[in-house]
Image (cartoon, helix red, strand yellow):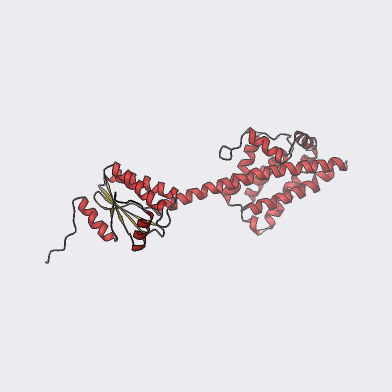
Amino acid sequence: MARLGFDERELQSRRAIFELHDEDLQRLTAIRAIAERHMAEVVDGFYALLLGHPGTRRFLTDDAQVARLKRTQSAYFLQLFDGRCDLPYVENRIRVGAVHERIGLAPKWYIAAYRRYLALLLERVVLDIPDRAEALAAYQSLKKIVAFDMSIAIDTYIAANLESLGRHQAAIRELSTPVIRVHERLLLLPLVGAIDSQRAQQVMEMVLVRVIEEKARAIIIDIAGVPVVDTKVADHLLKTTAAVKLIGAQTILTGISAQVARTIVQLGVDISSMHTLARLSEGIELGLELVGKRIAPKEPS
């Protein structure tokens, strides 16, 4: 509820947009006895649709599960006629959306199921009300609360899906930003792909953590795999270099092509605070020198 920003104010706002008024809730309470009489038929009809379609049948794997879900659905059905629409009611509906997202039920199946739900309510409950005007009013109230429920469940589905997507993207960014230990106190960060503000922040955080962990004196940042180096990318590199310098290490920038060099000059970006080299191999040689090592030719045997 916190992630969705669902508080009392949002509750009243949503009730207003769905025109779900107190008189609607009272009208639903008044026909609860009729709803109880037809509850089993509605629930059975609801699951007959789900079990009859291959797209939804795969979520219903065994008879015990179906029986358990029918009991849950019966409780849900009767809650429509409780005459309340408060925050505890909303919390219950949020759980419905979260479960649907977790099991992988696509919104199209969810919406189709609710269309069937409304049809069953009309056939089994509303048409059992003797007074036609009262029956029509009851059906309008039912449509309002069902639409209200659907909006909550779908919002929850989307929020949970976006949260899951965010975790996956973070994992991908972490994998695409590997800080490699080349030698004692020398690190290498090969950057591949576009660099946006979020990834740049992650790069800086990861570089600083690894430099401190490894007590590194130098880190090589290779940008050969970065397709575009613009002012923003250059600024991110400068900030990372400044942060690395504050903790006692130097930055070596490699992978600078002729096009990148020309772009940096044209942009007027001052990168004199870091060592710059064209090739990664040259950067490794310099890095080794900075940590007191060097590459020497093998002695003839």
| Left or right of 184 in this view: 208 | right
Residue 132: x, y in percent?
A: 87, 43
| Left or right of 251 in this view: 77 | right
Residue 47: x, y in percent?
A: 70, 51
Image point 80% across, 38% down: which residue?
31
**Quadrant in which the C terminus is drawn:** bottom left
Looking at the picture, tell me which residue is in the foreground, 231 or 197. Answer: 231
Is residue 158 depicted above or below 16 in this figure? below
Looking at the picture, tell me which residue is in the foreground, 283 or 160. Answer: 283
Residue 300: x, y in percent?
A: 12, 66
Residue 41: x, y in percent?
A: 76, 47
Give the farthest residue toward the right: 131
Give the farthest residue toward the bottom: 301
**Quadrant in which the N terminus is drawn:** top right
Looking at the picture, tell me which residue is in the foreground, 178 or 191. Answer: 191
| Left or right of 131 in this view: 171 | left
Image point 67% across, 33% down: which residue?
86
Q: How many marks?
A: 0
Looking at the picture, tell me which residue is in the foreground, 195 or 154. Answer: 195
Image point 67% across, 37% down: which residue?
13
